[in-house]
Structures are given as structure tokens and as C-alpha cells.
């Protein structure tokens, strides 16, 4: 779906090693920051890890696990809801705009430590899409696929039906752009950012939980913010 060439996924060991260097650069001075950018950029002309954006600063960091940032024009975009449902859906951006809308203001927290406070999100509750498709009784999970051709994520059905899990198309009052995963992305507000699948292409209702991309490298399936500090409970 994207005209971008697909790159090679990046392993967790490489990511964590460079993240450690990124943290060290905070204390060691700007010359390490410049060196870190050179190292991350050498991985690919497009920096498939997004790690060059982790050089100390403020605001968002932009990630991709392929060799570029994919793009789907809003006018051509379609989101499918498939799997164990009574009625498969194919939704355009206009279809999503016509559904009951939810606004949510939440911090966006990355598992690597950076955070953007008080982000204004707007979209459709994932539970509403599952209900419209007729998610069948007894189904255990939902799988999300990115149109980058590589990235996937998943939630249990109970997690997917939370009021703070949205399919979003608006960020701080504006349509979500390419770097932020637009035109449509997932927001799992109480979990670390890697659960919020960017460039969302499909939603699939399944009878079992299928771990996502980063879970394959050892990341937590239940990625509640604060879990890295010993928290195991779901937020209320």
C-alpha cells in the first residue's frame, strides 16, 4: 500500500544498545549527541530505528521499523475490520469522521523514557468499531496491522474495549500527519507508545492473542505505563 521500499526490521539488542548511548549523551555533552546521530544515521539513510531523533531535546520523537515513513493519502485510505466478526468493515476517513467522536487529553509516554504531556487526541472508540462489525462472542483478542508492511500490535479483548483506546485521526486539533502515523492510527492511552500502532491498516478480531512486533523482541505484552517501575495492575 505504500510506495516506500520496505526495510529490514531492527532488533531489540541494537535498539537498546543505542538507547543506552542516547541516555549517556544527556550527561556527557553535545559532542556525544552529535556522534549518536551519526551512528544512528549510519544504520540506514532513513534511520529505520528512529534513534537519531532520540538525541536530547523536547517534544516528539519519530520512529519507524522500516526504511522510511510510509504514506497513504487520506482520500485513498481504507481501514478494514475483519476476523471473527459478523460484518467485515471497510472504512474511509469520511466514515470515521461520521461516527460518534471521542476527545481525550492524555500524556504520550514512550518506553524509552520521553514523554509528551497533555496531547489532545480525537477519534472513534475502538469498542464502537468492534460493535459495528459484530465482534463474535468468546473472542479473546484484537490484532492491529500497519500499512508499513511490517509492524503489528495486539490487545486482549478487555483491553481493546477500554474507553481510553481509540482509533484516532486528529492530534492537537489537526489531522494526524505522516510522521505521527496518519492519516489514522491507534491510541492505547494507558500503555507505552509502542502499543499505539501507527499507519493503521487493519483491525482483526481473533480467538487468541498474537504478540506484536516488539513483543517478539522481549517487550511486555501488557505495557501499562509504569510497569517498568514494578506496576502490574491495569489503570482504572
Image (cartoon, rainbow, N blue to C red):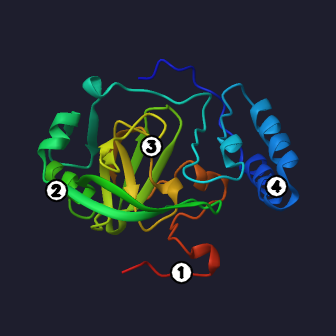
Sequence-wise first label, 2 or 3: 2
Dots 4, 3 in contact, CB < 8 A = no
**Label 4: few (<14), some (14–19) or many (≥20) C-alpha neighbours in 10 Å:** some
Mark 3 surroundings: few (<14), some (14-19) or many (≥20) residues within 10 A: many
Image depth: mark 1 or mark 4 in front: 4
Q: Is residue 54 above or below residue 220?
A: above
- Residue 208 visible at all: no
Q: Earlier in the sequence, mark 1 or mark 4?
A: 4
**Residue ID at (53%, 54%):** 194
Q: Are marks 1 and 3 in contact (CB under 8 Å)?
A: no
Marked residue nearer the N-terminal end (2 or 1): 2
| Residue pictured at 49% horizontal, 31% vertical | 149
Q: Nearer the viewer, mark 1 or mark 3?
A: 3
Q: Which tag, 4 or 3, sits closer to the chain's start?
A: 4
Q: Can you give x and y, in whole percent of width and height, for residue 12 in the image?
A: 71, 50
Question: Which quarter of the rendered picture does the N terminus lie within?
Answer: top left
Residue closest to the eye, 232 or 27? 27
Residue 131: which numbered mark, if any? 2
Secondary element at tag 4: helix
In the displayed structure, does residue 60 sit left or right of residue 207?
Answer: right
Question: Circle 1 is placed at which residue position?
Answer: 232
Gap in Å between the C-alphas at discs 1 and 4? 31 Å
Residue to which mark 3 is pinned: 198
State how far apart marks 4 and 3 are (Cα).
28 Å
The residues tagged by marks 2 and 3 sit, at their Cα atoms, a distance apart of 22 Å
Residue at x 45%, y 48% (from the top left corner)? 197
Which of the two discs, 1 and 3, labels the residue nearer the N terminus? Answer: 3
Instruction: Return the x and y of residue 231 as percentages of the image width and height.
Output: 56, 81
User: Mark 1 and mark 2 in contact (Cβ < 8 Å)?
Assistant: no
* Disc assigned to residue 25: 4
The label shown at residue 66 is none
- Could you tell whether 5 is left or right of 12 in the image? left
Amino acid at each position: 500500500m505504500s510506495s516506500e521500499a520496505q526495510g529490514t526490521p531492527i532488533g531489540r539488542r541494537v535498539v537498546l544498545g543505542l538507547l543506552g548511548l542516547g541516555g549517556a549523551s544527556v550527561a556527557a555533552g553535545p559532542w556525544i549527541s552529535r556522534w549518536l546521530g551519526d551512528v544512528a544515521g549510519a544504520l540506514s539513510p532513513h534511520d529505520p530505528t528512529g534513534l537519531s531523533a532520540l538525541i536530547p531535546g523536547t517534544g516528539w520523537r519519530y520512529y519507524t521499523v522500516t526504511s522510511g515513513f510510509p504514506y497513504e493519502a487520506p482520500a485513498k485510505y481504507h481501514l478494514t475490520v475483519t476476523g471473527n466478526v459478523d460484518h467485515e468493515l471497510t472504512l474511509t476517513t469520511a466514515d470515521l469522521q461520521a461516527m460518534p467522536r471521542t476527545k481525550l487529553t492524555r500524556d504520550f509516554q514512550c518506553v524509552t523514557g520521553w514523554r509528551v504531556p497533555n496531547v489532545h487526541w480525537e477519534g472513534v472508540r475502538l469498542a464502537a468499531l468492534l460493535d459495528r462489525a459484530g465482534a463474535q462472542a468468546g473472542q479473546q483478542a484484537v490484532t492491529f496491522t500497519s500499512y508499513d508492511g511490517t509492524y503489528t500490535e495486539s490487545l486482549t479483548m478487555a483491553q481493546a474495549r477500554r474507553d481510553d483506546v481509540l482509533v484516532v485521526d486528529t492530534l492537537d486539533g489537526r489531522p494526524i500527519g505522516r510522521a505521527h502515523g496518519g492519516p489514522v492510527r491507534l491510541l492505547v492511552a494507558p500503555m507505552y507508545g509502542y502499543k499505539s500502532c501507527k499507519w493503521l491498516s487493519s483491525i482483526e478480531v481473533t480467538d487468541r492473542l498474537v504478540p506484536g512486533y516488539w513483543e517478539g523482541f522481549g517487550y511486555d505484552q501488557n505495557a501499562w505505563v509504569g510497569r517498568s517501575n514494578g506496576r502490574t495492575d491495569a489503570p482504572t
